[in-house]
Image (cartoon, rainbow, N blue to C red):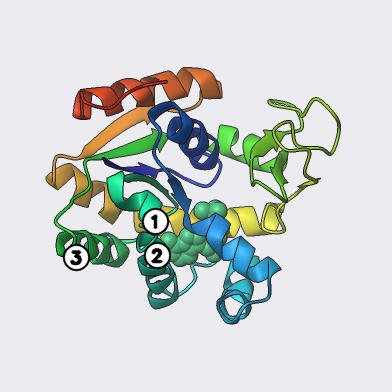
Amino acid sequence: MIIILLGPPGAGKGTQSKTLAKRINLPHISTGDILRQNVAEITVLGKKAKDFMDKGLLVPDELVTSMLIERFKQPDVQKGFILDGYPRNLAQAKKLEEILKTRNVQVDLVVYLDTSPHVVIQRLGGRLVCKSCSANFHTKNMPPKVSGKCDNCGGLLYQRSDDNEETIKKRLSVYKDEVRDLIRYYQQNNKLQRVLADDDAPIVLEKIVKLAQKSDDSIKVG
Ligand code: AMP
């Protein structure tokens, strides 16, 4: 099964994808996480992507797409996956369809996490990310048990460099420009389901799990 989570920065795509991945036993692929890992390891891709990411701009399509094609070669994705952060625009959506067609599979479900602007700003302002396993926490909504440490693996928590007010504004405006076309595209393909995502993470997760089960009743929910 192939599921895409769409939504503005701060909609909870990362948090939801990670927990959904555990519940339905599929790998989670986050283009943002892979890019940040490349930036941290100062790879060729990381060097090319860093400037765009720091400015809140999209990394050029061809860089992200070839990175994704590499990820799709890994054995764990053969039974399906949850995609978070890709596609970001219509060109990427069409490219994804093309790539999946060569593997005789298609996107089964696209969940749009509909989130109010004030919730987005509040979530991004306090977001903390684990350096080791990239789990997300929040200073108010979901504080870690021990300050500065990840509940799951004990890794160091940090604030993303693009989670500052100026870059958040830019990322939201980039998102608004691109998302309308994407929503229309997946609506026309009868794949899109909207979920109101202002609620707390566990409530939103149950709504997504129900949609996944409805879309494929053979999936096993843990
Ligand atoms: P995210 O973790 O999804 O919020 O992504 C963080 C940053 O990584 C974005 O602001 C972009 O600079 C870059 N990025 C992630 N996914 C993509 C994508 N599919 N296309 C282009 N840039 C991306």
Find out if the beta carbon at label 1 lies less than 8 Å from the nearest ligand 1 atom.
yes
Residue depicted at 19% across the width and 65% down the height: 98
As drawn, 3 above or below 193: below
Residue nearest the observer in this picture, 139 or 36: 36
Q: Earlier in the sequence, mark 1 or mark 2?
A: 2
Q: Residues within 10 Å of mark 3 (few under 14, many from 20)?
A: some
Residue nearest the observer in this picture, 26 or 137: 26
Which disc, if any, is residue 86? 1
**Callout 1: SS:** loop
The spot of residue 118 in percent (x, y) is 58, 34
Quarter holding the N terminus? top left
The spot of residue 212 in percent (x, y) is 29, 28
**Callout 3: SS:** helix
The spot of residue 37 in percent (x, y) is 62, 63
**Cα distance in 3D space between marks 1 and 3:** 14 Å
Q: Earlier in the sequence, mark 2 or mark 3?
A: 2
Kindly identify the amino acid type of the residue bearing the numbered disc 3. Answer: Glu
